[in-house]
Structures are given as C-alpha cells and as structure tokens.
Amino acid sequence: MSAMAAADTIFALASGAGQAALAVMRMSGPGSGTMLDALCRRRPAPRRAVVRTLRGPCGATLDRALVLWMPGPGSYTGEDTAELFLHGGRAVTDGVADALVGLGARPAEGGEFTRRAVRNGRLGLTEAEAVVDLVEAETVAQRDQALRQLDGELGRLYDGWAARLRLLLAQAEALIDFADEDLPQDEAERGAAGLRALRTDIAAHLDDGQRGERLREGLVFAVTGAPNVGKSSLVNVLAGRDVAIVSAQPGTTRDALETRVVFGGVPVTLVDTAGLRETDDPVEAEGVRRARERAARADLVIRVFDGRDNAYRGDEGSPDVLVASKADLGGSAPDGAIQVSALTGSGLSGLRTRLDSAAHALTARAGPPALTRARHRAALHEALAGLGAAESARLPELRAEELRLAMRALGRVTGLVGVEDVLDTIFSRFCIGK
C-alpha cells in the first residue's frame, strides 16, 4: 500500500460512543481493502456479510466480528469501503482503531464520509444536508421531511431550475456571439418568457412562510398573561413535568423558562414568561419586558387569563390561542377561548388538539418541497435578484452577466455549474458550428 493511499483512508465509529452490544466501525478510501485483508486475513465477497476473526499487527485476536466489504464506486462514499460490526466494549473498539492507525488509516473528521460522497457524486449538496437532518430528527414530521429531501426531492427541483437557467444563459450567449447565424426569430421573446416563468417559480418557492425551516428547527410557543392566572401550572401540565415553580405569590416567574415538547409531530419550545403587569420592582419589570419580547418573536402565543374574570382583559392585542384557566374554581370562557383546569385536567385535551393543529398549520407542506435552510433561502434570493436584473437589462451583454450571477448563486445550492454545461446547451439547442 502506498503512503498516499494509506493517508487518504479514514475510519470512524458509525455507532454511538460508549459501551453497547454492537459497535459499527467504518472505513473509506483506497487502502480499505488492503487494511481489511490485514485485519481478517480473508476479505469477503463484495456486499456479503461474513463472520471473521480480527487480528492486530502482532497476531493478537481483537474480536470476532461481522465484516462487510463494499468496493467503490458502488458505496456510500463512492470509494472502497468496509464496515466492521464489532462487540461494543471499549477495549474492542479501541483495539481495532489502534490497529487501523498502525496500518496507516487516520480518524475521520466530522462529516467526512458524507463530504466524500458529495465530492464523488454519490450525493448532492441538499441530500447531504438531509443526512444531518435525518440523524437529528426528533419527530415523525422532521423525519419525513428529511427523507423526502434525502430522496432528492428538493435537489431535483433545484436541478430543474439550474437546467432552465443554463438554457436562458445559452440563449443569451448565442444572441451575442452568433448574431450573424440563422437563429430562430422569436428566440429573444422565448428567452424573456422563460426568464419571467423562472422568476415566478422561485418567488413562489420563497414565499412559503418558512415552513420547512420551522419544522427542521422547531417552533416557539410563548405562554403569557397576568400574574397568578395559572401560566406555570399550564406549562407544567403540557410538558408532563415540573418546569416552573408554582406559587400563589405574584411575580414568582421572573425570567423566561423553556421546555421542549411535541405538538402535531412538530418539536416546540414552550416558554413560560413573567406575569404581565406594571411594577416598580426593577427585576420583575425586566422579566415583563423579556416576556413581551419573547411573545413578539414567538411563532404562536398562548394567552392565559383567570376564567373567573369571565372576560379576557389582556393588553397584548389579538391572541393566537386564548385560554381561560382555573375551570375547577368556576367561571366561564368567552367565545374563542378554551376553558381548562391544570388541576383536574378539564379542557386540556381540547387545548392540545388546538396546539397540534396550530403546529401542523405552521409547518404543513403543500405543493413543491419546502425550503429547509437559511443557506438555500439566501442563495435563492440572490438568484432571484439576478433574474430581475437580467429581465430589466437593456444590453444583451448585461443580461448574460446577470444570468451568470444568478446561476452562480443557484449553484451554491445545487453544486457548481461549469462553462462546458453552457457550451453543450448552446450547440445542442441551436446546432451552431454546422
């Protein structure tokens, strides 16, 4: 094995660290096959799992493990790859790692397997990001969104736009460089129509209420109201544990307390805020200011009032979800409010249903695949600006330059677009050079 091949071969645990029944060690790179031969003496047939005794450099037995050999390019990374399904003891995994280092491999850096898959064309950029989202998914809805993206749904949409943009640029370049050729008379009009259509599609994709990003990152629901109306009790019941201190003394909650819950398959940060009232206490006043600030930034506000008051007298404006608390002590709820009791559980099922519906509505997918990252959004805004500038450009040279800038911005999402792609489109579309 050459030193270069060994240096470019990486390994890492694909399973979690710590003691477990099994641990999965992955290798990738040109030296994987030779290293596997050194460990188990007899490399298995490709993609066939077999049991082998693994031995160290001095012949000492390291483990008896399941071994899988996957030669490139038909592997996750596109390189020669091996996986070792080891017993999960620390001594076993450390021993195998030391043996691999002794054979010339190096520990992989964070995300390096997926980075190699992108580099070798096994995954697109959006699909690689979906791998991370799938690993970090907390709920079914997050998992489903990540799987759709991993399946290439978002990448296919962006690749389609990139192809349309290449055609627009090819048309613009042809009108400049081959003005004396026998080009279709309506080519400029068709290019302008295609430009408008692409702008419309990208703008509609951006105007999605950030549903995909909200689902990936989670929502924020703020619970607000006057002191002693039962906010903390409600948060504790919804969270299923004691998050906030409950006391009859007003002003107990001074800062925003957060807990993670799930509504409608969507992760939600539920925030218990300080009671809203005028106060001379500077600490409580700061808590009130922070409560109003969190409410202003929240995806949804749950405004709580004491149901015995028979009316909502808050000053925060139109509520998102209005809750009349302390139903066990009497009172009633005005139209549109949900009457609950944190003590008896009365009305909580209806409140949870309402919150499930709200979370689903804020993240529901409709039509094309949703944007999932701020990186995509920024690049698409830049591409949209370039298309707008191209549409208003008076000179064909300026129009072509703006289209190139738009394509470069879109390329940051889909992958780089080369000059050869544009030239291929020109010659196939207009048969230039005949």
Image (cartoon, rainbow, N blue to C red):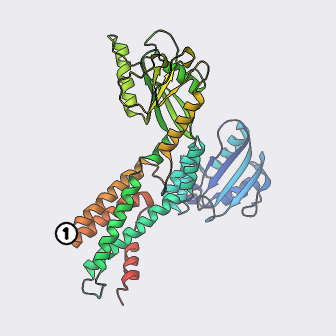
Q: In percent of the image, x 47 and y 9: which residue is there? A: 249
The amino acid sitting under disc 1 is: Arg
Does residue 136 lie above or below 6 as drawn? above
- In which quadrant is the C terminus drawn? bottom left
Label 1 Cα neighbours within 10 Å, binned few <14 / some 14-19 / many ≥20: few
Q: 347 or 61, which is in the foreground?
A: 347
In the rendered image, residue 67, in percent from the top left (x then y), is placed at 74, 54
User: How many marks are shown on the rendered structure?
Assistant: 1
In the rendered image, residue 113, in percent from the top left (x then y), is placed at 57, 53
Image-quadrant location for residue 281: top left
Residue furthest to the top in view is 249
Image-quadrant location for residue 48: bottom right
In the rendered image, residue 182, in percent from the top left (x then y), is placed at 29, 88
- In which quadrant is the N terminus drawn? bottom right
Does residue 229 lie above or below 296 as drawn? above
Instruction: Please give the residue where the numbered disc 1 appears in the rendered image.
Output: 394
In the rendered image, residue 47, in percent from the top left (x then y), is placed at 72, 61
Does residue 94 lie above or below 65 as drawn? above
Secondary element under disc 1, as helix, strand or loop, is loop
Q: In percent of the image, x 61 and y 52: which residue is there? A: 104
Q: 345 or 369, which is in the foreground?
A: 345
Left or right placement of residue 15 versus residue 330 in this view: right
